[in-house]
Image (cartoon, grey):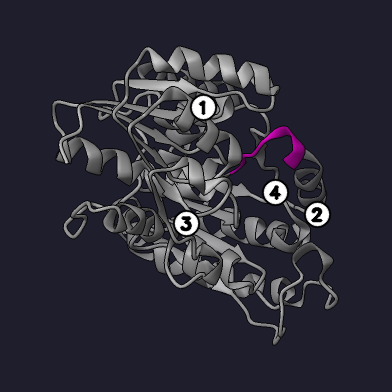
Amino acid sequence: MEYKRILITRTDRLGDVVLSTPIIRFMRKMYPSAYIAFMVRPENRDVVENNPHLDEVIVYDKYGLEKSFWKTFLFALKLRKKKFDVGIALHPTNRTHIILFLVGIPSRIGYDRKMPRLLTRAIAHEKEKGEKHEIDYNFDLLTQAGFNTERADRRPYIVTSDDDKKLVRVIKKEFGIGENVIAFHIGASCPSKRWAPEKFAYVADKLAEKYRADIVLIGAEETGKFADEMIAKMKTRPISLIGALLIGELAEFLAGCRVFISNDSGPVHVAVAVKTSTIVIFGRSDPGLSPKRWAPAGEKDIVLHRDAGCGRCLAHNCEKDFACLKAVTAEEVLEGVERVLGGFYSRRKGRHGNCFG
């Protein structure tokens, strides 16, 4: 298979796009002289905007400008001019498969869901079984389509811009944020993924005291109400950057943090992509939503997850008052931080005296 113009699509959420970045790197290595484009929703453009392995980022606004079928049809007609010879849909949607078909791409690879007859190669979709990590499922799609992925580098990555770097320096200066930072993200898309704000508050207070670290809260604006609950329970005063960072800026900020503590959410994968160690609290036991599929992919990352003995996970309709989440203790999170940061702070102590207070 010798492809000269490649289109890769991933039009779901932040974490999903981050976990698809190894596919971009793989395709560039396979086809060093090919023209490679990646299609995303507008809010996730920053994930791949500065990716050195891409020639173009194509934005498909399926909830905005291209919401109607007619607008999607016109969008596809514009893409026809780019003459892609292969399209790879990493996430199955009716619209994505329709677009690949309307664009007239000869080789259309994807999953056997959501109008798979519009594809030329439809691979069995088994992600709901949760038997592998999402990154491995992405590569399985390529493997079954005939690509040799045996030696592929499967680490997610994000490259930030000079503007991102400059803006983060300005933000740190304005908010008085130093270099010793522990960041928190306490929001999530579903209550079955949100650990108690008062537990986050307890952990943050302990870490601020023990490590003399700046505690910084990040997240989208909708995270604000949970952050307010956390702040109200804290003895120390954290710095809130809730709603203040775009994705590229978030990636640059997290790259300078000592550790990132979070619920199961997209920013976790952003942190991993910039090589910041993460501690993630997982709820839910459904295989397709479990840590086995969605855990952070870094070497030193820690996942905290408890099985509440549910025969079937009902997610936000939980009948056990989210017992799996409640089973994770603040002490476990603090122990996780000690495992991640112990070496770093031991070295600081040796150079600068006792930093534990």
Q: CA distance from mark 1 to mark 2?
A: 24 Å
Residue depth check, mark 4 versus mark 2: number of the one nearer the observer: 4
Check whether the beta carbons of the residues at disc 4 and disc 3 lie within 8 A of each other: no
10 Å crowding of disc 3: few (<14), some (14-19), many (20+): many
Q: Which residue is mark 4?
A: 187
Q: CA distance from mark 4 to mark 2?
A: 16 Å
Left or right of 109? Residue 168 is: right
Q: Which residue is mark 3?
A: 278
- Please determine whether, in this image, residue 322 is positioned above or below residue 345: below
10 Å crowding of disc 2: few (<14), some (14-19), many (20+): some
10 Å crowding of disc 4: few (<14), some (14-19), many (20+): many
61 and 301: which one is in front? 61
- The label number, if any, that marks residue 172 in the structure image: 1
The answer to whether residue 248 of the structure is visible from this angle is no
- The label number, if any, that marks residue 233 in the structure image: 2
Which element is circle 4 on?
loop
